[in-house]
Amino acid sequence: MAGEKTTIGVIGAALDLGSGRRGVDMGPSAIRYGGLSEALDRLGHPMTDRGNVLAPTVERLDQGDPSARYWDAIKRTCEELAQEVTEIVGEGGFPLVLGGDHSIAIGTLAGLARAHGAPGGVIWIDAHTDINTPVSSPTGNVHGMPLAVSLGLVDDPRFSSDVWPAPPITAERTVLVGIRSVDDGERELVRRAGLTVYTMADIDRLGMPRVVDEAVARASGGAFLHVSFDMDALDPEYAPGVGTPVPGGITFREAHLAMEMLHVAGVMQSLELVEVNPILDEHNSTGNLAVDLARSALGARIL
């Protein structure tokens, strides 16, 4: 969308059931409070805010199978989110999805594939690979499973849906960036799926510009290209308000450079910002940073 003034369709997913810590359901409000509407207006992008897809509170639910805690409620929320994303694309808009824990990506990707009629690619910027299955997960937290679900790696009928009858993304167009925390079971799943992964060591060695260029080349070519940005990809020094911080992450400038380069490449058709937890934040610094990264992804420049 480089150079274009596109209508941004904002949709929040107030969901924290996929996480082991409470509070990330307030992430969409924190990002909006950080001045999202004003930021998009300054860039000249029209915006339609569709509000939030809501999930039931944990106090009203039984967790169900501990290997995929609260999956039934998460699934319903993701199905509703998928419908919202499909409608935004159908209206010619650019979906900007605000999380919520990273399990919401199941709904976002399903909605994109439904709107475009075919699977696409994703650049997954995260400290974690998020490719656990109920069998491999040490916690049963679904926010560690969205890539496995979206790639069709979960052999369990509970994870099928009329909303995502086929995997919405393909392994050859799935690129992970910023990885530095991988569960034992995930290593084999990553190798078996044949995903392209850039760890923090790769970013240190190659530099962010080369990583982004290669990620764009690998993830492009499908029906769509989505960018899913987990705020814990950043070093906790810059983004303290996340549920699973991991030291040694992407720096402030590396993150902005990546977003700026993605804008210039002109291939990104949707963006997702997840895992902002205002309970754990400091003066909404992580929510504010999410807004700044969205601005960079949508065309903001220093000069």
Image (tube, rainbow, N blue to C red):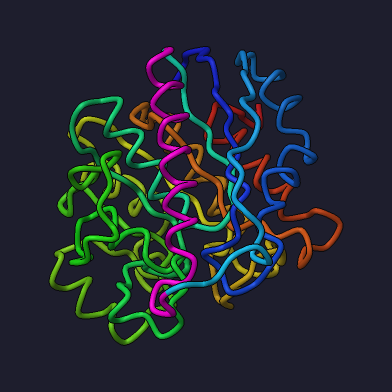
| Region rendered in magenta | 65-91
Q: Quadrant of the N terminus?
A: top left
Q: Please report the residue visible at 70 percent of the width from the left and 18 percent of the height from the top.
A: 41
Q: Quadrant of the C terminus?
A: top right
Image quadrant in which you'd find residue 146: bottom left
Compared to residue 236, the image places residue 273 above or below, namely above
Q: Please report the residue visible at 52 percent of the width from the left and 72 percent of the height from the top.
A: 63
Dominant SS type (magenta): helix
The mark tally for this picture is 0
Q: From the top left corner, tell me how far across and down residue 270 is, in percent.
A: 43, 33
Q: Residue furthest right?
A: 283
Is 216 placed left or right of 10 in the picture?
left
Is 220 placed left or right of 33 in the picture?
left
Q: From the top left corner, tell me how far across and down residue 14 is, in percent.
A: 63, 48
Image quadrant in which you'd find residue 177: bottom left
Q: From the top left corner, tell me how far across and down residue 161 is, in percent.
A: 28, 47
- 62 or 285, which lies in front? 62
- 149 or 44, which lies in front? 149
Q: Does the magenta stretch include residue 140?
A: no
